[in-house]
Amino acid sequence: MKSNMALDPNLSDPTLRRAAVEAACGRRPFDLLIENARILDMVTGRQRKADIGIVGALIASVHAPDEKAEASRRIDAAGAMVVPGLIDTHMHVESSMITPATYSDRVLPKGVTTALWDPHELANVAGLAGVDYALEAARAATLRFLTLAPTCVPSAPGYELSGGDFDADVIADLMARDDIHGAAELMTMQPLLAGEDRVTGIVNAGLAAGKRVCGHGRGLVGRELSAYVAAGVETDHELTSADDLIARLEAGMTVELRGSHEHLLPEFAAAILALGLMPQTLTLCTDDVFADDLLNKGALDQLMRTLIREGLPPFWVYQAATLNGASRIGRPDLGLIAPGKRADIVILSDIEDVRASMVVMNGALVASEGQICTPSAVTERPAALSASVRTRDFVPDDFEIASNGSSARITTLSKPRFPEWGEREVTIENGHLQLPDDMIRMAVVNRHGQNTPVRVAFMENWGNWRGSFASTVSHDSHNLTLFGRDPLDMAVAANALKAMDGGLVAVRDGAVIASVALPVAGLLSDQDLDAVAADFAAVRAATDSLVDWQPPYLVFKALFGASLVCNKGPRLTDVGLVEVFDGIKLESSVLEGKAAR
Amino acid sequence: MKSNMALDPNLSDPTLRRAAVEAACGRRPFDLLIENARILDMVTGRQRKADIGIVGALIASVHAPDEKAEASRRIDAAGAMVVPGLIDTHMHVESSMITPATYSDRVLPKGVTTALWDPHELANVAGLAGVDYALEAARAATLRFLTLAPTCVPSAPGYELSGGDFDADVIADLMARDDIHGAAELMTMQPLLAGEDRVTGIVNAGLAAGKRVCGHGRGLVGRELSAYVAAGVETDHELTSADDLIARLEAGMTVELRGSHEHLLPEFAAAILALGLMPQTLTLCTDDVFADDLLNKGALDQLMRTLIREGLPPFWVYQAATLNGASRIGRPDLGLIAPGKRADIVILSDIEDVRASMVVMNGALVASEGQICTPSAVTERPAALSASVRTRDFVPDDFEIASNGSSARITTLSKPRFPEWGEREVTIENGHLQLPDDMIRMAVVNRHGQNTPVRVAFMENWGNWRGSFASTVSHDSHNLTLFGRDPLDMAVAANALKAMDGGLVAVRDGAVIASVALPVAGLLSDQDLDAVAADFAAVRAATDSLVDWQPPYLVFKALFGASLVCNKGPRLTDVGLVEVFDGIKLESSVLEGKAAR
C-alpha cells in the first residue's frame, strides 16, 4: 500500500540523514537526547535501559547509556518507561463534538500521536466542504490526523438522504490527494455483496490508488464475510462478539479493536488470552468517544488500560497500539523506538494505567504533564458548515401518524441496537394513530434542504419515556432525529435544535431542560472540551431522567445509532421505514390490509 | 514503502474482484476449490478445517467445508495442512551456480513461491548487463523472483576492481524501474558511517524512491549499528551470534535469519525461544546455498526444518517464512491464506519436516509431488555474460612474491573467516619469499580486463595444503582467486579456469583432479542442478582431499569469502592487502624496515 506522509517532515531528506549518521557516530551533538529511559521494546517485548538520540524528526541512535553523548537539549526520563507514540487506527473526531484542534490538544498529552480520522459525519452533512474542512484542520493540528475519504455518503444510497453524495468518481478524486490516506469504513455491505455498481466502484477506486480500503462488516459471517474481504476491504472494527473477532483475524483482516463498546472488552480480552499471543494484525481504535467520556475517562489510553485490567499483558496492548498499528496503516516510520524511525516517543508515568508524562512528536516535546506545549492552529469554520439545520418550523401535528378508520395494523420497530420488525394493532382517534402505552415515537426529518416529509414510527422495547430527546447527531446522515411520546415535546425539541443551528436537546413538559449547541455542521462545538463535556453530561443526565435505561442495549448511546441504516435490521430514516439487506422501503408504517413487507 | 507487483497478475482488476465476490456469494463457481484442507493460520496460530475458493489469482473465500460450493476444478487436500507460499527474503541465485530458471523449477516444488534476489554477483562481473539478465530471467521464471538493485558494485570501491561500477545515479535509474523491488544489501558499511558521498548517495536513491534499502551490517554494534540504520538501511542477515540477532531486532531492523551459516542456528533458536515469541520483524532467508546442498538438503525448507528441530514451534517458523516476510517486504497480497490475498498456497505432506506435496501460485497448480508443473521459460545467455575470464595466461612465477636480500618481515593474513593482520619473518631464496611450512599462498587476479598484477599473500592458520583450489566465484568482485602452496599447481589451476570460461577447479601434483565449469559470467552453469551438484560435490571432495578442515571457521566455504573486503578485517584483493575499516591498502606484503601499516 502507499505510505502517505504528506503532513510530516520528510525523513528521506539527505541532509537530515547525514546529520543523523554524524550524530550517531559522535561527530556532532544530537538535537535532543532522552536520557535514562527504560524502553519497552515493541519487537522483543523486553525492557532495557537506553538513551535515545534524536536529530530533527528522526531517531538517530538508541544506545546503552553513554555519558559521552553530546546534545543540544536533554530530557531526563529518570528511569521511566518509554514507548512509541500511540496510534488510533479508526476514529471520528466528530463523535467527541469538539473541533479537531481541541481534540488534538487534549488527546496528545495522553500519548496518542496518530489517529486515522474518517470525517464521515462532516461529509454526510456538508459533502466535500466537510472533507476539505477536515483536511485543513488536520494540517493545522499538532496531533497527526491521517484523514480518510468517507466512502458512505450517504451510508445507504436510496434509503436515506444526507448532505453529500460521493460516488466512485468523487472517491477517485479524493484518493488522488496526497493527504488522503485511504478509503474509510465501507458500511454499504449489502450493495457490495450484491455487486452494485456504485459501491463496487468506490472500493475499486481505493484499490486502484493503492491505498487502504477500510471496513465496517457488521454481522457478516462465513462466505459473506469472505466476499466482503475479497471485494477489497482490509479492516473491520464492527465486532460484537469474540467469535466476530476470531473470524475477522482468520479472514486476514486488520482488526481495529475498539473502545467504544466497553461491555465487549472482557470477552475480547479473554479471546486474545486464549490465543496465547497478540495477533500482529490486531490494532486499537476508539471509533466514537463522547465528550464527557473523553474528559473523564480518556481516548485510546482508556481502551488500553481497560484491556490491561482485563488481564492482557501490557506489552501486548502497547504493541497493538504502536507497532501493529504502524505496520497495518503502512507507516514503517512509526511504531518503534529505533534508529531511522520517526521520533514519536511517549514517556510514561504509569505503564499499566497508561499515563503519559511527556510526549515527543517528530522530535519535539509537544506535551508535558497532561498539557499541550504546541497548541494546534485554529481553523476557520467555513460557511458551508454553518446554519446546517435546513428545515421548516415544526408543530406537534408533524409527529403524528395520520390514518383513517378506527384501527390499523402497523409495522413497528422492535428492540434497540439490533432492531427487528414488529407488528401491532393500534386504535385511531382524530385521524391519528394512537401510541400504545408501552411504545415511543421516533421521528426523522431531513435537515439537508430536501424538504421531505417528517417520518414517524412507533417503537417497542424502548422503555418508559417521560419527555423527548432530539439530536442533529444521528448516524450516519445526521438528519434531525427525535424520540419521545408527546408530539408537543417533540415539536419543542425540533424547534429548539433549529434555533441552535444543531446540537442535542432534552425536553420535558414542553420545555427544554438541557442542551448542547453544536453549530459546526450540527455536529461540533467551538467550545473547549470542558464546556462541551459539561453540557453533554447535562443532556445525558437530563435524558436519563426521561427514560429508564436497560443496558447493554437500551442505553443513551443507542439514540445516536437508531437511524444507522447500513447495518442489518429495519430502521427509520428520512425516506421512511427501511431495511437495506432485504431491499425494503415503506413510506408509511400502516399496513395495507394484510399485504405487508 | 512501495509495493511492487510488476511480475504478478493485477489483483486490483475490477473484473477479477467482481468475479471473486460473485463466487464467494455462491452466484458463480470458483475457478479452483481446495477442499478438505487444514489451515495453519498465520495470524492466530490455530489450525482449522477449511475449503479455499479461488478465482483467477485471487483467494475469493476461505470457509468452513461447504458441499454446495461449485468449482470448475477441485483439489482434494485430504486433510493435509496448508500454509501460504514461503518467502525467502534474501538470496543470491548465483550461489547455487545454476540459472534462475533451474533454481525456480527445483525450489518451487519445496513450497518457496517468492525470493528476493540480489543479483549482486552477476552485476559485479557484468555490470548492468548482469542486472538486465537477472530481470529478464525473473520475468521468465515461474518462481516469483523480486529482484533488487545491487548496491555494492564493487563492494569496496577503491579497495578492489570488479566488472561493474554502480554509483548513485545508476542506482537511482534502477530504482525507477517497476521490476526493481529495492536496494540490495548495503555492504559498504564503513564508507556509509564515514559519510562518504558515493555510498550515502546510493542509500538516498533508495529512500527517495520509497523502496526498501537492505543491509549487511556485519559486526556493527552500539552507536555504529544505530548510525547504519539511521542512514536508511532497514534489514540485516549478517548475524554471527545471538547477541547480534537481539541487537538488530532492538534496532528495529527486519532480520533476515539465514540458513547458510548452519552452525549458528542452535544459538539463534535458543535466543528466540528465550524471547517467548516470534518477533514480527524476523523473516527467513537462504542467502547462499551451494548446488549440492540445494539438491541434497534444500533451500528455505532446510532452514525451516532445522529451526523446528532446534525446538522452535512450527507455527513460529512458518509465520516467519510467510506473514512476517510478506509484511516486511511490503507485499500485503502475500503471506496469508485469506480472502483478498494472492492464491499462493502450499499443501504440506509433513509440517515439521517442511515437505510440500502441492504448490499453488497465483491460483494455478505449479508443482506437485516434488515436480514442477509449469517450467520456467529459458532465457538466452547474453554475450556480456560469456568469456568472462579476461586475463592473460599464467606461469608459476606469477604466484611468487619477489624480494631482495636474504630475509624479510612480511604482513600476513591470519585466521579464516574473521581475518586479522599477522607478521612473520621469512627467508628469501632466488629473489622470492619462501613460504613457511605452516602457511599457504592466496592469490587474486583481476578477471574483468583491468590487467592489474597478480596479488599474492601468505596466510596463517589455513591448515595443511597438498594442492591448489581456484575459483572465479569469489565474493564480491569475483576475481580469479587461488589458494595453495605450490606455484605450479596454482598456475595450472588458473590456466584451467581461463580455458573453461570460469568455474571451480582442484589441482594436485600439477594436474586438475576435479572441476565445475561455470561459463555464465564465471558464476553459473547452464546444466541442470543434478549435473552441477555432482561436479560441485566432486570439487568439494577433491578439495577436502587437499586440506584438513577445522570447522566451524576453516571450512570449504571460507574459500569463497576470503576476498570479501567489505567486512571488518584485512583481506587480499586485486588491489593488494586491504582493510576498509582502517583505510589500509598495501601493494606488497613486505614491510619496509619496521615501518608498517
Image (cartoon, coloured by chain):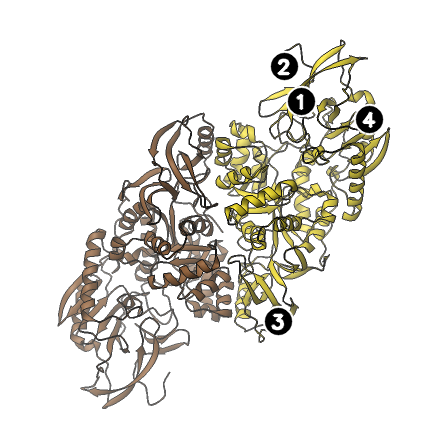
Chain colours: A brown, B yellow
User: Do the residues indicated by labels 2 and 1 lie within the same chain of the protein?
Assistant: yes
**Chain of the residue where label 1 is placed in the rendered structure:** B
Which of the two labelled residues, at mark 2 and mark 1, occupies the earlier sequence position? 1
**Cβ–Cβ under 8 Å for marks 3 and 2:** no
Residue B450 or residue A552, whichever sits in front:
A552
User: Do the residues indicated by labels 4 and 1 lie within the same chain of the protein?
Assistant: yes
Q: Where is residue A129 in the image (x, y as percent from the top left)?
A: 32, 56
Cα separation between marks 4 and 1: 21 Å
Cα separation between marks 1 and 3: 66 Å
- The residue pinned by badge 2 equals B596
Residue A535 higher or lower than A161, as above or below: above
Q: Residues within 10 Å of mark 3 (few under 14, many from 20)?
A: some
User: Do the residues indicated by labels 4 and 3 lie within the same chain of the protein?
Assistant: yes
User: Do the residues indicated by labels 4 and 2 lie within the same chain of the protein?
Assistant: yes
Which of the two labelled residues, at mark 4 and mark 3, occupies the earlier sequence position? 3
Q: Residue B71 carries which label?
A: 3
Q: Residue B577 carries which label?
A: 1
Q: What is the three-letter code of the residue carrying label 1?
A: Leu
Q: Nearer the viewer, mark 4 or mark 3?
A: 4
Which of the two labelled residues, at mark 4 and mark 1, occupies the earlier sequence position? 4
Q: What is the three-letter code of the residue carrying label 3?
A: Ala
A499 left or right of B422? Answer: left
Label 3 SS? strand
Q: Residue B491 carries which label?
A: 4
Q: What is the three-letter code of the residue carrying label 4?
A: Ala
Whether residue A235 is visible here, answered yes or no, is: no
Answer with the quarter of the image where residue B371 lies: bottom right
Label 2 SS? loop
Residue A195 or residue B214, whichever sits in front:
B214
**Cβ–Cβ under 8 Å for marks 1 and 3:** no
